[in-house]
Amino acid sequence: MRWEDLDREACSVARTLSVVGDRWTLLVLRECFLGTRRFEEFETRLGIARHVLADRLKKLTEADVLSKSVYQERPRREEYRLTERGRDLYPVMMTLAQWGDKYMAGDAGPPLLRIHKSCGHVTEGVLTCAHCGEPVSAHEVSVKAGPGARAATLPARSS
């Protein structure tokens, strides 16, 4: 499997990585979820080189994860907003942050707390079964071939 061919793999993880699979892209997405929208804001908050940022924003826009909207005509200025595809990445970002809070934050604790607006309490994402609502862990899931499977993507063994 070659990095530049990930988008053609019969694997949803590989295809997703073809869009969001580098550190700068994930940090751009983090910023989007924190409310950053303008190029200069991304550049300042991330300390990223302009050409790298422009490349990542272009890639996310082409993948329909972000959309551009004009906020000023003269001079023309655009901002970046998450699309439905982009907003659907929130559980992924929250899970990555939770893992980092648990294993990488150190004695200082998590740098950000996620507050559920409805109840006002600190929250964590919990993976649940869409059918029965019970929490799900890796040991409670098995996989089987789906309609888009190829032999190379089938699990080595099913659990």
Image (spheres, rainbow, N blue to C red):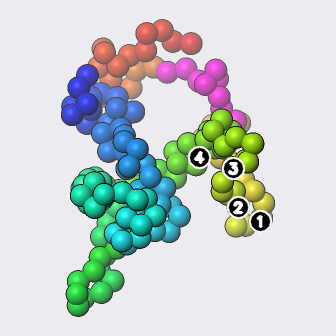
- Which three-letter amino acid code belongs to the residue tagged 3? Pro
Quick one: label 2 or label 3, which is nearer the N terminus? 3
Q: Nearer the viewer, mark 3 or mark 4?
A: 3
Quick one: label 4 or label 1, which is nearer the N terminus? 4
Q: Which residue is identified by label 3?
A: 110
Front residue of 141/63: it is 63
Q: Which residue is identified by label 2?
A: 116
- Which three-letter amino acid code belongs to the residue tagged 4? Ala
Pointer 2: residues within 10 angstroms few (<14), some, or many (20+)? few
Q: Which residue is identified by label 4?
A: 97
Q: Give the Cα separation between the discs numbered 2 and 3.
A: 16 Å
Front residue of 81/42: it is 42
Q: Position of residue 97 (x, y in %)?
A: 59, 46
Q: What element carries label 3?
A: loop
- Which three-letter amino acid code belongs to the residue tagged 2? His
Q: What element carries label 4?
A: helix
> Residue 132, which numbered label?
none
Q: Which residue is identified by label 1?
A: 120
Please say if 39 is above or below 19: below
Chief secondary structure of the magenta portion: loop
Residue at the image position 26 percent from the left and 22 percent from the top: 1
Badge 1 vs badge 3, beta-carbon distance below 8 Å: no
Q: Position of residue 106 (x, y in %)?
A: 70, 40
Which residue is situated farthest in the bottom direction here?
74
Report which quarter residue 15 is drawn in: top left
Badge 1 vs badge 2, beta-carbon distance below 8 Å: yes
Q: Give the range drawn in magenta.
A: 135-143
